[in-house]
Image: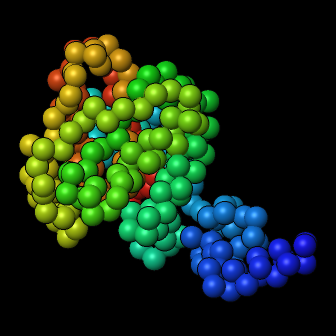
Amino acid sequence: MNTIKKWLSSFLGLLYPNLCLACSEHLPAHKEYICIACQYKLPETGFHKDWDNPFTERFWGRINLFSGAALYHFTKGGKTQQLIHHLKYNGKREVGIRLGQLYGSYLKETPAFECSELIIPVPLHPKKIHSRGYNQAAVFAQGLSEGMNIPWSSVLKRNQFTSTQTHKSRLERFDNVSTAFEVKNASMLEGKHLLLVDDVITTGATLEACALQLLKIPGIRLSMATIAIAG
């Protein structure tokens, strides 16, 4: 019986190879998603250890941000980009959950984030959710929630379908999304420390547009976290 199981496992491995989502190398049958080598080589930022860092600097003079950080650096063609691509376009929502769990374990031990009370993902428009099947930021929020042991909620709503942000300048990106978001049940959030999350920060325009809506709520503190930060 064991011989048959091993043969069947090998046969299925040929048809559906178990590959690392960061480098595409073969993984052992019992391993999932990311190989050990990539786990060590993925470019962690360490931003969560410092109150002032390249993430928070992007919002200086723009919004009142309590803290902000990203797990990995994002470079074109790099391992982080491969993971994000699988999460957004190849249906690998487990990547977002696992990375959220990992980063959550870091953030819950960090003074800048340990007092967060509610995680809020940047929303997608229903048309994009329908085509993609899920919101990658919400999947990341789910993993963070498990890692930090605090709740998450989709209290932000995207009420406009906007064009892609790719190839737009920071100002063009902000104009593209400046009126795209609204907050549901805002009174329930008063006085809380909110953690706004997304998959990647580039110029920060989308996060800023969401933040401006959340900061209208009396008494809140706002922090941000993303899987990656682009150069």
Write the residue at 20% across / 62% down: 165
Write the residue at 25% across / 50% down: 124
Q: Residue furthest front?
A: 1
Q: Is residue 3 above or below residue 225?
A: below
Q: What x and y, as percent, mark residue 19?
A: 63, 75
Observer able to see residue 170 = no
Instruction: Please tell me in which quadrant of the rendered image residue 195 appears.
Output: top left
Q: What x and y, as percent, mark residue 218?
A: 22, 15
Does residue 98 appear left or right of residue 2 in this picture? left
Pick the quarter of the image with the C terminus: bottom left
Instruction: Please tell me in which quadrant of the rendered image residue 13 appears.
Output: bottom right
Observer able to see residue 137 = yes
Does residue 201 appear left or right of residue 28 in this picture? left
Instruction: Please tell me in which quadrant of the rendered image residue 69 appears.
Output: top left
Q: What x and y, as percent, mark residue 83?
A: 50, 65
Is residue 49 or residue 119 the one in the foreground? 119
Write the residue at 47% across / 57% down: 93
Is residue 117 or residue 169 the one in the foreground? 117
Is residue 8 or residue 79 the one in the foreground? 8
